[in-house]
Amino acid sequence: MTTSSPLGADFLARPDAVLSELRERCPVARVTSPAGRPVWLVTREADVRAAFLDPRLSLAGAPPQPGRPHRAMDMTLVNYDPPDHTRIRRLAAPAFAPSRIAAYRGRAEALAAARLDALGRPEALDLMAEFAEPFAFGMLCEVFGIPDATAPGLHRSVTGLIGHRDTERAIGELDAIIRVQIADRLTAPREDVFSVVVRAWQASGDVSEAELVDLLAMLVLAGFDSTVQMIGLSVLALLTHPGLPARLRAEPGLMPCAVEELLRWDTPGPFSTRRVALADVTIGEAVIPAGSGVLLSVAAANRDPRRHPDPDRLSLDRPAASRHLTFGLGPHYCLGAALAKLELTAALTALLRHWPSAELGCTVEELRWSGGHQHRRLDALPVRPCGRPQSRSDSAKRARAR
């Protein structure tokens, strides 16, 4: 079945509504992507889970043009299939081991608290620009060991790439920064992510310098914007569900499960990276011909009632909430999953403690979204940290009551 594209402007604001209809009506649908290309869209959880593990669905991208100088981001981990993917990924796996990441918990908590202390209690602010982005970038610099003098240039290049501003310059600047950091770790290794990856690269003997640069550039980018967006989406979810923030404050032991549920509830990446069928592949009742493009809808799978009962209810103590597919599955499971959860936990804990009366500063319909179907971005999140300002009539009523 071929449908017109369901991935238009309305999709960015309400992907759950669009994907829910597709999942129930046509779980493997041939649609037109926003770029105008036909693609098969897979939306049921069992099908998405199986497809993640199917080696016939390839992520391999086209290599850079011969003779052109290599630059960061020419090829990244998401452009490789095993065994090349395995060969490169193993350099970074030790740096993101849960035991190593857990050591950053105290620093994450301190950074979140310090940022909120600096902001004080303003009447209104944009949570994305004033908290989520500075906190996520601060953690990026901490975990990767970015020197203070390098941080402004890295921030400029990373935000330029994310916002598609002067992309050529941003790629060139990021490439230069990555190469300087590699050279520094070769002469003065430490225990940050750059050092651990460079040390593994030296010992490997089967990964080129170009592949190392691509790997580190991808880790830097993936470790920033996805975290910013996940903080924003999680705060939005809590502020639009009255009673849940108060419950989390009263029952802090719920936080690990709540973080998993928030990751299930909404994600900045509704789809996995586009795959190509290397052979005819049967998914559900559909036969996808060899050479076809395939999108796996993580967002639709995370709301599939066959896996998650009552999926459109945000439940802070949902059993098996961690069965979501937000970080993928199989060989391409997100390297930074443990770090993302740690940062989200620290951010939400600090926000609930500092601003217990926070409210959304606009209607949900007024929120602005950008990006595309692969990575939707919440441009701003207006928040009133102290709640709605009292009107004179409210103050008078309280005075009379006293």
Image: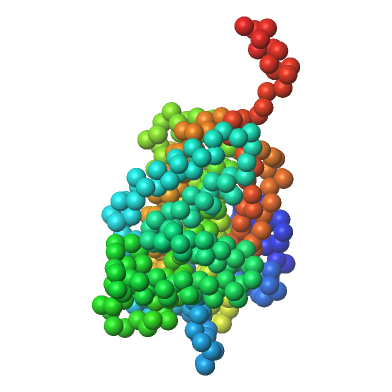
Quadrant assignment, res 383: top right
Quadrant assignment, res 49: bottom left
In the current view of this chain or complex, which residue is farthest to the front?
149
Quadrant assignment, res 167: bottom right
Tell me where residue 385 appears, x and y as whole percent. Answer: 58, 34
How many discs appear? 0
Tell me where residue 151 appears, x and y as whole percent. Answer: 48, 61
For residue 210, side relative to residue 225 (left or right): left
Q: Kindly identify the residue that appears in the image at 73 percent across and 19 percent down.
A: 392
- Can residue 390 be seen? yes
Looking at the rendered image, the quarter that the N terminus falls into is: bottom right
Q: Kindly identify the residue that appears in the image at 28 percent across and 78 percent down.
A: 202
Q: Kindly identify the residue that appears in the image at 34 percent across and 51 percent down.
A: 104
Tell me where residue 346 appears, x and y as whole percent. Answer: 42, 44
In the current view of this chain or complex, which residue is farthest to the left?
203
Tell me where residue 181 appears, x and y as whole percent. Answer: 39, 70
For residue 189, side relative to residue 114 (left or right): left
Looking at the rendered image, the quarter that the C terminus falls into is: top right
Q: Is residue 187 above or below residue 245?
A: below
Q: Is residue 334 above or below residue 116?
A: below
Q: Is residue 256 above or below residue 392?
A: below
- Can residue 340 be seen? no
Q: Is residue 266 above or below residue 382?
A: below
Front residue of this view, candidates 313 and 380: 380
In the current view of this chain or complex, which residue is farthest to the bottom?
67
Q: Kindly identify the residue that appears in the image at 35 percent across and 71 percent down.
A: 184
Front residue of this view, candidates 318 and 362: 362
Please, which colouring scheme is shown?
rainbow
